[in-house]
Image: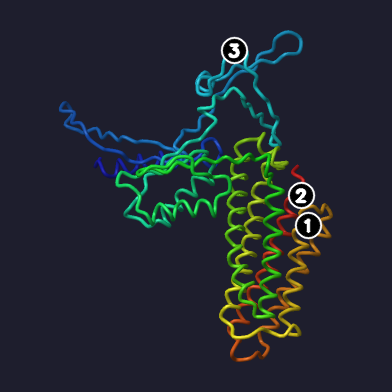
């Protein structure tokens, strides 16, 4: 058999089996790659044996393995199970240390240890600064490390940072990432450390602050539209950085709470599946803030204000109310009441569609059309928030 077909066949069979295991949940994403192929001639029968070498990796860089242990019964009421020696050594567990056993909603048991050394507890990352790439792209990599939970992020370069790159990175971190502070600086290195205590800023407070900020931006953008107040419009645009800071912090908290059950309790997560719901909610709030900025930018393009009698202000008031109601729905347990908010938000969106066909002054027609579109999107994002609130209220069987 030819080496190429045989190699492909082996690769296909192993990959297929891996995919089946992945679907069954037995492994988390093995991916097999053909590393090398070669053949050894067997001169006795004048045939060849094809050898195929594969390497397997998982998305996280670690092989997810399951270790089966038998439960032993001792005494009259005690069940005992041994711990995997590799896990014990990896976390530095010693005899006499205390383990925390947490029954999970899916009937599994989470075993955690407080005996993890400081070296293990603090997550560190080193990023090579690429001068061939833009400062914005390098910043994006740094932000990604912040979001996934690294506590110390070391940005290094052999060539040294240019004055522009150094200032851009430092200013951007200060403006966008809550809790991340510059602790060391040299010609070739910038070291940032997250000094934030999650207990000081739980998720509920982050969402509350984020919502209050976005609501004020939405209201002020309409005030700027009515009075053609350029100063207020510019202030709305500047506040968008604060919204982004709260949003990125919320994402960091939610990611960390998925991996740390004790942390999830501290920041107010009752169930791991709530993390996805909150992730969608904070994204919707952030998008409402973006549309408030979009309204403010259109104000800057206009030559004059708009009369308070214009129907667009009725649309703005309706959008604001459903946005407030959608946030309140997160605390609501009556599913029918939340459903009414979803229905109302969709009605507001339809009202916005009906206003699109009206006649407006030619000089402001494009800008007002963009403002109307943003207000309609605010209503739609409000409906999304309320729908997530319904999903989060459904009790898991």
> What residue lies at 52% left-to-right and 38% top-to-bottom?
151
Q: Tell me the distance, in whole angstroms, between the alpha carbons under discs 2 and 3.
A: 43 Å
Under circle 2, the secondary element is: loop
> Dots 3 and 1: beta carbons under 8 Å?
no
Is residue 395 visible from the viewing direction of this image? yes
Residue 12 in sight from this viewpoint = no
Above or below, 141 against 214 in this view is above
Coordinates of residue 8 in the picture (x, y in percent): 32, 44
User: Which numbered dot is residue 95?
Assistant: 3
Q: At 76% across and 49% down in the image, what residue appears?
A: 394
Horizontal arrangement in the rendering, residue 272 relative to residue 46 (left or right) = right
Q: Nearer the viewer, residue 28 or 120?
A: 120
Q: Which residue is mark 1?
A: 329
Decide which of tag 1 and tag 2 comes sooner along the chain: 1
- Residue 166 higher or lower than 77, as above or below: below
Alpha-carbon neighbours of circle 3 within 10 Å: few (<14), some, or many (≥20)? few
Residue linked to disc 2? 394
Which mark sits nearer the N-terminus, 2 or 3? 3
Q: Which one is earlier in the sequence, the residue at label 3 or at label 1? A: 3
Left or right of residue 333, residue 362 in this image: left
State how far apart marks 3 and 1 are (Cα).
49 Å
Q: Spatial distance from mark 1 to mark 2, Cα to Cα?
A: 13 Å
Quarter of the image containing the N terminus?
A: top left
Local secondary structure at mark 3: loop
């Amino acid at each position: 058999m030819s080496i190429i077909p045989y190699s492909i066949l082996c690769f296909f069979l192993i990959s297929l089996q891996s995919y089946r295991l992945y679907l069954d949940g037995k492994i988390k994403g093995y991916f097999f790659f053909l590393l090398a192929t070669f053949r050894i001639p067997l001169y006795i029968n004048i045939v060849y044996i094809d050898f195929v070498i594969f390497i397997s990796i998982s998305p996280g860089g670690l092989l997810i393995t399951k270790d089966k242990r038998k439960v032993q019964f001792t005494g009259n009421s005690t069940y005992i199970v041994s711990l995997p020696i590799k896990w014990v050594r990896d976390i530095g567990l010693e005899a006499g240390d205390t383990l925390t056993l947490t029954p999970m909603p899916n009937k599994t048991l989470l075993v955690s240890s407080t005996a993890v050394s400081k070296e293990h507890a603090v997550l560190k990352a080193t990023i090579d600064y690429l001068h061939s790439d833009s400062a914005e792209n390098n910043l994006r990599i740094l932000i990604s490390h912040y979001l996934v939970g690294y506590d110390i992020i070391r940005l290094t370069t052999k060539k040294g940072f240019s004055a522009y790159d150094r200032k851009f990175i430092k200013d951007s971190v200060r403006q966008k990432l809550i809790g991340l502070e510059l602790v060391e600086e040299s010609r070739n290195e910038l070291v940032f450390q997250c000094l934030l205590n999650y207990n000081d800023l739980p998720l509920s407070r982050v969402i509350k602050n984020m919502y209050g900020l976005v609501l004020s931006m939405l209201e002020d953008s309409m005030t700027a539209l009515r009075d053609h107040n350029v100063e207020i419009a510019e202030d709305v645009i500047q506040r968008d950085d604060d919204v982004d800071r709260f949003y990125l912090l919320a994402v960091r908290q939610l990611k960390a709470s998925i991996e740390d059950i004790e942390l999830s309790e501290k920041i107010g997560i009752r169930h791991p599946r709530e993390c996805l719901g909150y992730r969608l909610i904070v994204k919707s709030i952030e998008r409402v803030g973006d549309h408030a900025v979009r309204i403010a930018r259109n104000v800057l393009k206009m030559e004059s204000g708009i009369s308070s009698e214009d129907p667009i202000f009725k649309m703005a008031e309706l959008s604001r109310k459903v946005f407030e109601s959608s946030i309140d729905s997160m605390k609501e347990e009556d599913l029918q009441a939340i459903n009414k908010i979803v229905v109302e938000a969709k009605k507001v969106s339809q009202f916005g569609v009906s206003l699109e066909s009206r006649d407006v002054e030619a000089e402001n027609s494009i800008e007002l059309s963009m403002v109307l579109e943003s207000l309609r999107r605010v209503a739609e994002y409000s409906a999304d928030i309320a729908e997530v609130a319904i999903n989060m209220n459904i009790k898991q069987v």
